[in-house]
Structure formats: C-alpha cells, structure tokens
Image: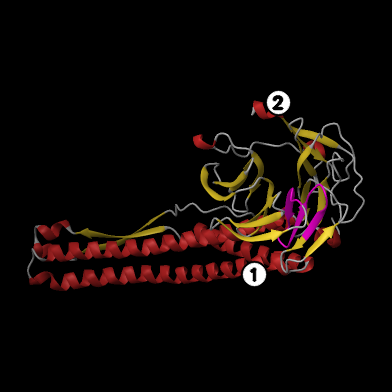
Amino acid sequence: MKPLSDILKQVKSSASVQLFEKDLKDVKENLEEIIKYLNHRINTSTIQKTKAAEQIRSMRKSIDDFLNKLEQEILDDLDSKQSKLKSKMDTLLQQLKTQANQMSQLQSEFSKMTQYATELQMYVGLREIEKTTSEAAKYLEDLKSGGQLDEVNLELTISSELQSILKDVKSFGDIHINTSPFTLQLKAVRKDQAQYLVHTTPTIEQIKPSLLRHLTIPQDMKYINIQACTILPDGKYLILDSRYDKSNLLLFSNDGMFMREVVKFKRYSYDSCFVRTNTVAVALVSEKQIALVDVENNKIFKSINISHLCSSVASDGQMLVVSSGEKSTIVNLNDMSQTILEGVRQIVLHYSKEISMVPSTVKTKSVAIKVLENLSGHLYDDIVSPRGITLDKNGFVYVVSMSNNRVVVVSPDGKTCKTILSEANLCMQ
C-alpha cells in the first residue's frame, strides 16, 4: 500500500481526475436521459388516456341513456388509474431532478476544486465525489432492476357484448396498465473507483502507440504545412498551418472531419498550444508576439508583446513560457507580468508547473527541468533536430525528431529511450 504522501503528490495529475470527471458527466447524463424518458412516458400516458376517452365517448353515441352510468364509471376508473400512474412517476421524477441538481452542484464544485483546492482538499473532495456518484449510480441501477423504470401503458378494451345486446352488458370495459421492460440505454459508470487514485507507472517497453484518428484534409487544402497539432479538452483537433508569410488555425471535429478555419495570421508561426477554456496561444515569430485566440468565437482577443523572437510557446493555464534561440520569457496570464530567463535558449518546450525544454544543441533532456536549472542532458542517436516535446502523467518525455522522422520516448530519469513511431511504421498504418 502506498503512503498517503505519495498518493497526494499525483492526485491532480492522476488519471482519476479525468475518470471522476467522466463519471460525474455520465451520471448526470443518465439522470437527464431518464428525466426526459419519464416526461415522454407521462405525455404518452396522457395521450393514451385521451384516446381511450374518445373511444368511450364514441361508443356512447350509439347507445341510449342506459349507458350513462356505466360510461361515468369507466371514465372514473380511467382517471383513477392514470392519476395513480402519473402520481408514481411524478414522485420518481422529482427524486431524479433532485439527484440531477446535486450532480450539477458537484460539477460546479469539482471545477472550482480542480482550480483552487490543495492536494489534500482535492483528495478528500474526490472521495466525497466518488461516494456521491457511486450512490447515484446505485440508485439508478436499483430503479432499473426494481422495475420502477419499466414502461407502463394505459389500454382500453371495449366489451364486445356492448355492440349487440345492451341488456347483457355489466361494464363499459376494462382499463389495463401493461408493463414493458425498461429499454433505455444508460452509460455505464465505473464501480470501486477509489482504486484509480493509486496508479501503476508502466515501463518504457510497455509504451506502444496506437492510431487514434485520421484527419480528413479538404481537397482545396491538400498542400498544408503543419507546424503544430493540439487536441482540445472536448476532443476536437486544432492544426497550425504555416507557410511563408501566412498562418492558419484549422479546427477538426472529434471524428477527424474539417470544421472551419478559426483565424488567419499574416505572418509565419512555428508553434501553438492550448491555454485554458476555448483559448489557444499562437507564437508569431518575427512579430515578437503571442496571439491569444478564442477558438469558440474565431477571433484574436489579445496580443502579448515579447522582447525576443517567439519560436515556441507552452502553457499550464496560468503561465505562458515563450522561447527562442536568444532567450526565454515567462508570462503571468493573471497580471501579464513577464520574467526573462537570460541564457535559456531553447527551441522546443513543454510547460506544466515545471518546464522541460529541448535546445538545438542538446538532443533531449530528462523530465521536469526547473527554471534556471542546469540544462545539461543525455545524447541519443534516435533524436536528430528535435521539433516537439511533451510529457505524460508518468513523467515520460516524448520528442519529435525531425531529421529522421521519428517520435522517441525517453524515461523520466533520462537514462533510456525508445523509438515508438518512425516513417516506416507510420506508412504501415
């Protein structure tokens, strides 16, 4: 069993954060689907009641006053059974709405917690969320297994004798409530989620890439020069197409289909990165600027002037790190203050609380290079002219090697590396 201190170090960066967020989303969507379903069933039962009443009144026209009493009895029976049915569903509907409101409140608190909570608060909060979502999921499962969500219908059966011999008729008909199994497909929610708070780090040999998606480039855009590709939090893809004296940000859907051009630039750009909600940063090299782009509204809403060329950019949502062959600068996005890192001359970087950089003279660098720390690194034959770097949650460093068309993974301690993608196996895929 791992010590609590070890668990707390990785709570926010662990996969459990995304898993719990997905659980919240799935449970809330399940609640919304069931509410929608029950509203539909109430409307259906009302329509069934109306249709039955019309049949009753239509039959009544062909018979004399002898049937008035029977007619009223069957209408009362219909109203009584439909009212009982509706009352049960109204009660269940109110309970589900209460659950849905609770999930909405949890989502709001979860968002604030991920931004402002300490690691301990985050850990405690996740346990509470785990408990609440598990209870909600069990509640839904109990509803389903207990038959409370089964489909019920009102049906009217007109007595056949009524049409022939009025004196033999003892009742106007019967109202039946037929039940059918609940068929609505709900999203599966994980059980025993606490185990995901402690995760096992894979070895470098276990890292094997798989094809996620092909992006479909429109015919009139076949000749594009991709400088950067970002997967946004909602699963969409954002490509930076940069050629000579212009650059474009192109948005693709989750399934890889082209959606739209987000914004154009009149200058060349090497790099872009995700910043936070609907915001990406684009490094405009010669203009010595970082453009902040609103992806949702297709516009540049802020330009940040930098004292040097802007070759690459990375962000953790609170800070921007801008790098060039001369120096590097950290920009605080809250007050826009800038801190210049003299002598830190990198061309590719990754930033998430700590900075990892690939300089032109160093083939790669081990994970978590702190600002102003010694930049000496390890040399690898696999990496030639690095042009991209990122880190996963386990600390493995992934470097794009331009000259030999490879993607190389380097262990967190920088002692071992492995080519995981090359031009050869990309062609095979």
Q: Does the rendering let one see residue 120?
A: yes
Quick one: label 1, few (<14), some, or many (20+) residues within 10 Å? Answer: some
The quarter holding residue 255 reads: top right
Q: Position of residue 261 (x, y in %)?
A: 53, 48
Q: Position of residue 421 (x, y in %)?
A: 73, 33
Magenta run includes residue 325:
yes
Which of the two marks, 2 or 1, is nearer to us in this view?
Answer: 2
Q: Where is residue 19 in the image (x, y as percent from the top left)?
A: 66, 55
Quick one: label 2, few (<14), some, or many (20+) residues within 10 Å? Answer: few
The relative height of residue 429 versus residue 160 in the rendered view (above or below) is above
Residue occupying image coordinates x 25% and y 72%:
76
Q: Which of 184 and 32 is in front in this view?
A: 32
- Secondary structure category for the residue under label 2: helix
Tell me which amino acid carries mark 2.
Ala
- Range of residues picked out in magenta: 309-330
* Count of numbered circles on the image: 2
Residue 336 numbered tag: none
Colour setting: secondary structure
Magenta run includes residue 134:
no
Q: Name the residue under label 1.
A: 109
For marks 2 and 1, give the CA distance. Answer: 47 Å
Left or right: 154 as drawn, with respect to 69: right
Q: Name the residue under label 2.
A: 424
Left or right: 43 as drawn, with respect to 288: left
